[in-house]
Image (tube, grey):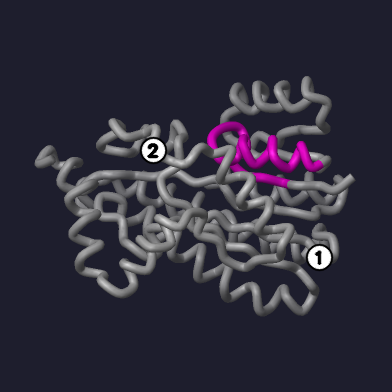
Amino acid sequence: MKHCVITGAADGIGQALAQRYAQADYTITGIDIDAEQAEQTQSILQEAGHNASFIIANLAEQGDLGRIVGKLEAGPKIDTFIHNAGINAVGPFATVPLSEQRSVVEINLLAPMMLTAGLIKQQVLNPNCSLIFISSLSRFVSYPGAAVYAASKDGLAAYARSIAVAVGRDDIHTLTVYPGPTRTAHARRYSPDNRNEKKRMPPEVLADKIYQAAIARQTIIIPTVRHRLFALAGLVFPRLTEWAMKKTIFDKLQGDG
């Protein structure tokens, strides 16, 4: 049985990915800081007849990163590792506490880098393994009001692109995902306007698209046509998309929308 490891697997996109890969007969190892939610997700998977377990850890703690690698080294080799965990810190840049900004960088960017290095060094990955990095559509259109989040996701995309050259020699596949707004508690928590939440992509749909892209050995996926067009607009008309993002996000965070 193949083995899939997912960070931030207790809820949202991570939980949907765990369910999708479990349906494809993967053993699931989730990594999450929320022990209560992790237990619930593990029970859901196990009651459906799937092999699933969780490692409870804080990805912002270097000691926990080493402990994660050690636990994974003691288990079955990994066929798919999904760097999904992410947090946000919204508001005018200068007023967001520095501790929150630092945590965003540590969890969204540094943890994937350190975990990937540890897994490769300890030879925990199977040949033809897939490394999947969940970036953000903000890579193309900016994210005013969440500057550090955008920076961390840009950095993750750049890291994934660069490391692909090195790990490709060992037949390790990399996939970078650029999702737009997704119907999760995380998106609801940080969005200044949830009136159109039903228009956001269900995490189950996104999870299936990621799974299919990984099976096809794609290297990049922007999940919908609408998001691909928006990303293209961000590249061709950057000022226009920045204005649109400012009106829909930043102005509303300041109470002007």
Look at 39% across and 45% down and name the residue there.
Answer: 88
**239 and 84: which is toward the camera:** 239
Q: Is residue 199 left or right of residue 179?
A: left
Look at 68% across and 64% down and name the residue there.
Answer: 117
Image quarter hosting the C terminus: top left
1 vs 2, front mark: 2
| Image coords of residue 77 (percent x, y) | 85, 53
Magenta segment: 5-24
Tell me if residue 110 is in the magenta stretch.
no
Tell me if residue 18 is in the magenta stretch.
yes
Look at 30% across and 74% down and name the residue there.
Answer: 236
Which numbered tag is attached to residue 128?
Answer: 1
- The quadrant in which residue 125 appears is bottom right
Alpha carbons under labels 1 and 2: distance apart: 36 Å
Instruction: Identify the residue position indicated by label 2 in the image.
Output: 199
Q: Is residue 205 left or right of residue 81?
A: left
Determine the secondary structure under disc 1: strand
Determine the secondary structure under disc 2: helix
| Image coords of residue 142 (percent x, y) | 31, 61
